[in-house]
Image: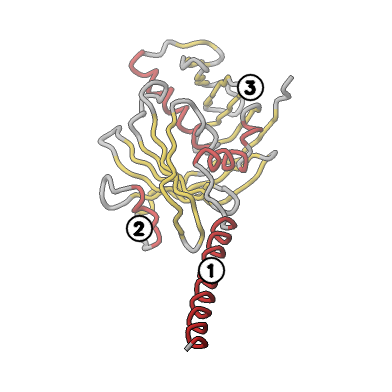
């Protein structure tokens, strides 16, 4: 009887010991598992991957459709330009750091109706904004939220939602964006957004033709439209994979040039 009792006690002692070891193993594995970075770290890495430190102090030039663009950024200030000709003589639109807009023809300042100044300024700003994304996602008016991690075409991405405060968020502050940022190298490969102007709509952009110029990443985009006007942005990657989006256009940045500006 004593031998049987001892065997039972021994069994339960071993059983408990195995349970304790298994529990400790789970804790060790959990502590060793890679942790998801917070959204600020994700965006910081994405900006760094795309050459953000160069963008913030540089001259950047490129052609987009029928216009030539130039951005000068230095020590937190910026001047954004759009010209009809490469020499910027025929017509030159300038958006200044304080939001002011001026149009020059043959180097002479022209009078632009107040009703059109904001429209021209938004047009200039939009092209420059998209040309160096994700640079700009740390602006004070931006609120960023990590939604989740999701696969698109077999590749893992952080899905980051971006909204804007009314103060400092520009005329289109109500627009909502989503960025697909690679969990491997922090490249932004997809962008989606809802916009409210001109009756509103939704777009999904697929990056392609990546080039790196002086450390700055440039991409072109295939621009898609969903069948419905305002689907959840989180649905668009699945619709893209299922070929449910309509290709509207290609957004191509031609001949980008980058000249870094030395910082004192």
Mark 2 vs mark 1, foreground winner is 1
Q: Quadrant of residue 78?
A: top right
Say which mark, if any, is on residue 251: none
Mark 1 vs mark 3, foreground winner is 1
Give how far apart the Cα atoms at labels 3 and 2 are.
40 Å
Q: Quadrant of residue 58?
A: top right
N-terminal-most mark, 1 or 3: 1
Provide residue 146's location: percent of width, then percent of height.
44, 44
Say which mark, if any, is on residue 74: 3
Residue 250 vs residue 7, the one in the foreground: 7
Give how far apart the Cα atoms at labels 2 and 1 are.
43 Å
Judged from the image, the secondary structure of the residue bearing numbered disc 2 is helix
Classed neighbour count for the residue bearing mark 1: other residues with Cα under 10 Å, few (<14), some (14–19), many (≥20): few
Question: Which residue is the site of mark 1?
Answer: 22
Provide residue 45's location: percent of width, then percent of height.
59, 42
Question: Which residue is the site of mark 2?
Answer: 239
Q: Quadrant of residue 217?
A: top right
Provide residue 6's location: percent of width, then percent of height.
52, 82
């Amino acid at each position: 009887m004593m031998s049987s009792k001892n065997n039972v006690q021994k069994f339960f002692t071993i059983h408990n010991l195995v349970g304790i070891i298994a529990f400790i193993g789970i804790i060790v594995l959990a502590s060793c598992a890679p942790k998801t970075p917070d959204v600020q770290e994700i965006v910081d890495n994405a900006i760094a991957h795309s050459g953000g430190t160069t963008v913030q102090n540089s001259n950047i030039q490129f052609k987009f459709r029928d216009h030539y663009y130039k951005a000068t950024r230095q020590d937190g200030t910026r001047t954004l330009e759009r010209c009809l000709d490469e020499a910027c003589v025929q017509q030159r639109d300038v958006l200044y750091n304080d939001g002011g807009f001026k149009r020059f023809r043959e180097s002479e300042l022209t009078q632009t109706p107040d009703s059109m100044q904001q429209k021209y300024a938004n047009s200039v700003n939009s092209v420059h904004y998209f040309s160096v994304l994700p640079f700009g996602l740390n602006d004070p008016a931006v609120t960023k939220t990590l939604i989740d991690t999701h696969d698109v075409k077999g590749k893992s991405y952080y899905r980051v939602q971006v909204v804007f405060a009314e103060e400092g968020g520009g005329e289109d502050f109500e627009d909502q964006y989503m960025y697909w940022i690679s969990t491997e190298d922090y490249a932004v490969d997809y962008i989606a957004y809802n916009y409210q102007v001109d009756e509103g709509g939704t777009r999904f952009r697929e990056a392609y033709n990546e080039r790196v110029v002086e450390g700055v990443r440039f991409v072109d985009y295939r621009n898609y439209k969903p069948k419905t006007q305002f689907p959840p942005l989180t649905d668009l990657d699945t619709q893209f994979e299922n070929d449910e989006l309509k290709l509207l256009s290609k957004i191509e940045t031609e001949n980008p040039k980058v000249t870094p500006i030395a910082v004192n």
